[in-house]
Amino acid sequence: MNALGRHILVEFIGCSSEVLNDVSAIEKSMVFAAQDAGATVIQSSFHHFSPFGVSGVVVIQESHLAIHTWPEYQYAAVDLFTCGESVDPWVSFDHLKKAFQAQNQSALEMHRGSLSMLNRVNFDAKDARSEMETYLTPGKLERCTWFTDKDENQALSLRYTGDVLFQEKSPFQKVRVLQTQSHGKMLAINNMVMCTERDEFHYHEMLVHPALQAHGNPKKVLVIGGGDGGTIREIFKYDSIEKVVMVEIDEAVVRASKAHLPTLSCEFSNPKLELLIDDGIQYVANAAPESFDAIIVDGSDPVGPAKGLFSVEFYRNCERALKKGGVVATQGESPMFHEQAFVELNACLKEIFGEKKVHCALFHATTYPSGMWSAQIAVKGDYSPSKDFSEEKAKLFSREKGLKYYNEELHSAAFKLPTFVRQLLNEK
Ligand code: SPD
């Protein structure tokens, strides 16, 4: 070869859509394809784009391998660029063809840096050498695989190791547990962050405690969703609890959490828990009137099976199932990220419980898109969850139970809304 390198531009056609949408599988195949070809891998960086597609690059000492996939077209565009005689890019080609289950392919090989066109100069890098040595041959592959939770305009990305600890396409959704670099293990449903070990306490404490502290004496609580177990963990911190009924539609979420998220799933064996794998919307529709002190709705975003958790009919049934003095707290989405769902949910609660009976608490959910999240709380009684709670009891409770987010001061503060949120909710 009379050139510095070989560059193969590849079209893989008729591939497996599943594989082309699996960022971990692609990263592993690309790294392996490089190593198989005799290359020294320096770094890999891969992103998944929701709902479809993966882009990534494997930097090798001998140039790079890059990919962009279109699972919806079963198509991958791949660049295999290698320098030197010791690496054969066609070995990578064969490996990837098999890995992606391509039915068809085309490849165009170009020589890069034709030596007949280039002049070698006496470039002496000795001055830069000591500094360069820190960058040269790190010796260890640095993997950089990114999980992205996004809508069409905004996104949140977390870097993970590329290891997928749990992966299942249940009848309802895609459930995964990923090992992140900085946030411990993460539960993701349909490419949306549900919780990470590092910051889940923000969400679970704020979904449960403002409502239950205001109620004051919760005995029987219904949880809709919440399959990872974080919500029931918080509820069982109340000594008054006699029974918790939890209705989770997807047993795969419970299984994933029991297997990989022990700090969330620690209360599944509590004898006061009745766990039903069933449709929570149906359950509430059939629930006996005035049977629960509190209902906590811990669903995912309003797409897929959680859509019905944002409907008037569902909350009418919740109101009926609540005892007098009861409280419902629901994950209320983000005023920034899901403005419409946030506003509509608030209006729906106000329509059913009454204008003055619905209160919104804001908190930081650092791994949910925008980082600003809400619990929307409605009461069936003459009290205000933001004001009518015992500061003394909340203080004692948060200390005794070792809470890490909720405390007596935050209880009041969480209900103080920024002006733009007040305006969204038509509050003064
Ligand atoms: N955007 C994510 C909203 C998810 C709310 N529920 C998460 C479940 C944690 N128990």
Image (tube, helix red, strand yellow):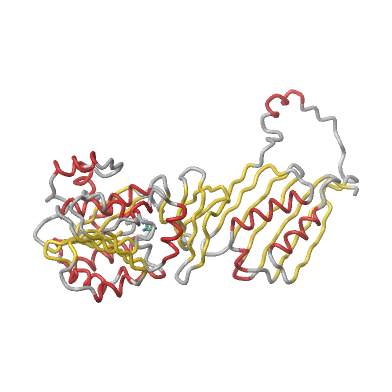
Is 64 displayed left or right of 277 in the figure? right
Residue 33 falls in image quadrant:
bottom right
Is 169 displayed left or right of 412 in the figure? right
In x, y percent, where is residue 147? 52, 53
Vertical position of residue 289 compared to residue 22: above or below: below
Decide which of 188, 258 is in the foreground and name it.
258
Decide which of 134, 306 is in the foreground and name it.
306
Task: State the residue at coordinates (38%, 46%).
Answer: 199
Tally of marks: 0
Residue 227 falls in image quadrant:
bottom left
Task: State the residue at coordinates (72%, 26%).
Answer: 128
In x, y percent, where is residue 22? 59, 60
Residue 346 falls in image quadrant:
bottom left
Rendered-image quadrant of the C terminus:
bottom left
Task: State the residue at coordinates (74%, 48%).
Answer: 35
Name the residue at the front extreme.
271
Vertical position of residue 316 compared to residue 195: above or below: below
In x, y percent, where is residue 314? 26, 72
- Dividing the image into four quarters, tell me where ligand 1 lies: bottom left
Name the residue at the left extreme.
382
In x, y percent, where is residue 167? 53, 60
